[in-house]
Amino acid sequence: MKYLVKFFVITFFLLVCTTSFAEQKIVMLDMTFVLNNSKAGKGAQDFLKKAISDNQKKFAETEKKLKNEEADLIGKKNNMTKEEYKKYSDALRAKVVEYQKERKEVFDKITKQRSDARKKLLDKVTPILENYANENNISLIINKKSLIVANPSTDITNIIVEKLNSELPSLSLK
């Protein structure tokens, strides 16, 4: 009799759990696509790419000047005293150190801008996803990158990109 009662209780719980899990709606989202192809994401990427290319050109010119100065210094080495050569080489080293410091600061700034832009986008996407999940009775939103196989009809990426574009048309990066 005990076993019969246990059997019915376990069967009842399995049926209830199976029914509740069967009613859950799960969708997928390609977060990388959302961040890269929304208007704000594209604008931020274009701004950062332009900043990187401009700075790379500027630093390439500076590097070329420093190499020319080094070549001139090496060429004049035989005509200088040791003290003069040391003075000029120390000045050149100081310029190189300053160049490296400036370059590091500029690229650190760009890296910080990139992470801030990503954070702003994610902060804006999260409430959009929550609202969409509540409106459409969605139990779970999974990142597409983590999936192996899924039905393409469960992809909500384009819907979220449209909502993000309407709520956040651009990011202000400085």
Image (tube, rainbow, N blue to C red):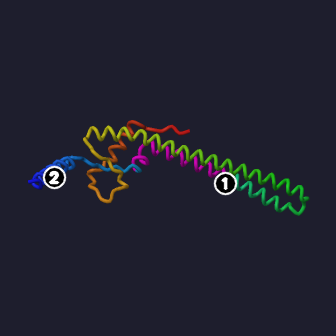
The picture places residue 117, in percent across and down from the top left corner, at 49, 42
Membership of 11 in magenta stretch:
no
Neighbour tally class for label 1: few under 14, some 14-19, many 20 plus, Cα within 10 Å: few
The picture places residue 24, in percent across and down from the top left corner, at 23, 47
Which residue corresponds to mark 2? 10
Q: Amino acid at mark 2?
A: Ile
Quadrant in which the C terminus is drawn: top right
Q: Image point 43% across, 38% down: which residue?
A: 169
Asked whether the beta carbons under mark 1 and mark 2 sit within 8 Å of each other, the answer is no
The picture places residue 153, in percent across and down from the top left corner, at 26, 51
- State the image quarter where residue 151 is shown: bottom left
The residues colored magenta run 33-60
Quadrant in which the N terminus is drawn: bottom left
Which secondary structure type mostly characterizes the magenta part of the structure? Answer: helix
Which of the numbered marks, if any, corresponds to residue 60? 1
The picture places residue 111, in percent across and down from the top left corner, at 56, 47
